[in-house]
Amino acid sequence: MYTDIAKDHFAHPRNAGVMPDAQGEGSQENPACGDLLKVFIKVNGGRIADIRFQAFGCSATIASGSMITEMAKGKSLSEALAISDQSVSEALGGLPPNKRHCSTLAAETLHQAIEDYRKKL
């Protein structure tokens, strides 16, 4: 079962969409289920000033993508790198055990976007 928080993030995803002028991008696919998540960031003063996501997958992947944007926006890059799959799952009120890979996908994709930004400096 999904919590009301997870259902709300699935039904009304926050920060969804592509960011054509992103300074950092991450893209991850879960080979087991085929879910795909993309995260786009803009950084200002060492903080994530704007963040967007695009998800192709199940409701848990969409909810995790939405939640990670809420958790990372305004954070410093090191604070955002500290966001874990566990913290995403907890923020959603918990995910079913067979859907925990969705929060892992979200955290790893965010981290990849930050690393991409750092490589471009």
Image (spheres, rainbow, N blue to C red):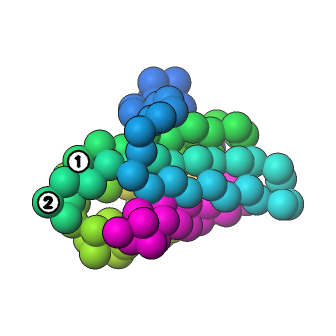
Give the left or right position of residue 68, taking residue 104 as reference. left
Q: Residue at x 75, y 48 (%)?
A: 35
Q: Nearer the viewer, mark 1 or mark 2?
A: 2
Provide residue 105's location: percent of width, then percent of height. Answer: 61, 60
Question: What stretch of residues is rendered in magenta?
Answer: 97-121
Q: Position of residue 70 (x, y in %)?
A: 32, 45
**Residue wearing tag 2:** 45
Name the residue at 41% across, 39% down. Answer: 21
Residue pictured at 19% horizontal, 54% vertical: 44
Percent position (x, y) of residue 84?
Answer: 44, 71
Horizontal side, residue 101 vs residue 10: left or right: right
Residue 95: image quadrant is bottom right
Q: Is residue 118 visible?
A: yes
Determine which residue is flagged by label 1. Answer: 49
Can residue 3 be seen by looking at this rendering? no
- Farthest residue in the left direction? 45
